[in-house]
């Protein structure tokens, strides 16, 4: 995709980096953002960064990214004080992208409660195609086409029945695992939008251990598609 060409300041994208992620997950998310057509000014935000995770910083951003890495309970322990700040940012028109752990955190048990449903562990499903929390490649139907992504103990997502009528939050299911559960989703949240994904569309070649091969090759187009979807009204 080409670079964003509009005149004026570049849209800012914030990537969380801190105890609720790992450095490699944050770096890969930042690299994915820099490859898109949006021309993002990518900055890290977190407790040890020059930009804090607070309301004024979020107001400066077009997109906030919660990367993968680590376990849900300790991650939410670190991020829980920021829950209402993040919810207000998105409700007022901000965009959220949650990858793997960031997808879990978009759920409610525990998490930021950004979805008209929740996130849960894919490998625990009786018909999951990946059944262990190790490096893997998972097959998904991405807008109907068979594709493959790096995967490590990511979530699937479910929606409350009749969620459109109950929550007034139309959802776009972008991808499903082979068992039909949701692998990637974009949903409205107030005036903003939330994108979540269980696999890792940002994973580069360094993430793949010897012997693990992605039949599609190392590609980033699915991550770009998800970002385009969450950024486009």
Image: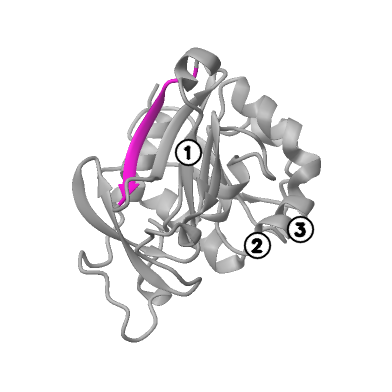
Q: Is residue 18 left or right of residue 123?
A: right
**Closer mark to the observer between disc 1 and disc 2:** 1
* Number of residues whose C-alpha sits closer than 10 Å to that of mark 3, classed few (under 14), some (14–19) or many (20 or more): few
Instruction: Quadrant for the C terminus, please.
Output: top left
Residue 70 against residue 44 in the figure, above or below: below
Q: Quadrant of the N terminus?
A: top left
Q: Is residue 179 left or right of residue 24?
A: left
**Which marked residue is nearer to the observer: mark 3 or mark 1?**
1
* Contact flag, marks 2 and 3 (Cβ < 8 Å): no
Q: Earlier in the sequence, mark 3 or mark 1?
A: 3
Q: Is residue 158 left or right of residue 214?
A: right
Residue range in magenta is 169-177
Q: Are marks 1 and 2 in contact (CB under 8 Å)?
A: no
CA gap between label 2 and label 3 equals 20 Å
Residue 171 in the magenta stretch? The answer is yes
* Residue at left offset 53%, top offset 63%: 25
Q: CA distance from mark 1 to mark 2?
A: 20 Å
Callout 1 secondary element: strand
Image x and y of residue 78, in percent: 77, 53
Which residue corresponds to mark 2? 71
Q: In the rendering, at what x and y percent does residue 200 appear?
A: 42, 58
Which residue lies most toward the right here? 81
Q: Would residue 168 be seen by someone viewing this image from the given angle?
A: yes
Residue of label 1: 158
Question: Main SS type for the magenta part?
Answer: strand
Residue indicated by mark 3: 48
């Amino acid at each position: 995709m080409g670079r964003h060409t509009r005149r004026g300041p570049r849209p800012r994208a914030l990537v969380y980096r801190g105890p609720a992620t790992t450095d490699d997950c944050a770096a890969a998310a930042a690299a994915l953002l820099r490859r898109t057509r949006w021309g993002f000014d990518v900055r890290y935000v977190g407790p040890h960064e020059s930009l804090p995770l607070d309301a004024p910083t979020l107001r400066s951003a077009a997109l906030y990214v919660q990367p993968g890495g680590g376990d849900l309970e300790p991650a939410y322990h670190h991020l829980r004080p920021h829950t209402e700040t993040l919810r207000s940012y998105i409700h007022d028109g901000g965009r959220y992208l949650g990858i793997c752990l960031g997808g879990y955190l978009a759920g409610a048990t525990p998490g930021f409660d950004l979805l008209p449903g929740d996130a849960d562990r894919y490998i625990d499903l009786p018909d999951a195609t990946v059944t262990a929390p190790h490096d893997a490649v998972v097959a998904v139907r991405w807008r109907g086409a068979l594709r493959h992504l790096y995967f490590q103990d990511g979530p699937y997502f479910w929606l409350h029945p009749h969620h459109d009528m109950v929550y007034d939050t139309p959802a776009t299911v972008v991808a499903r695992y082979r068992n039909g559960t949701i692998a990637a989703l974009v949903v409205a949240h107030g005036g903003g939008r939330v994108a979540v994904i269980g696999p890792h569309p940002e994973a580069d070649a360094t993430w793949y251990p010897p012997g693990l091969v992605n039949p599609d090759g190392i590609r980033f187009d699915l991550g770009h598609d998800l970002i385009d979807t969450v950024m486009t009204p």
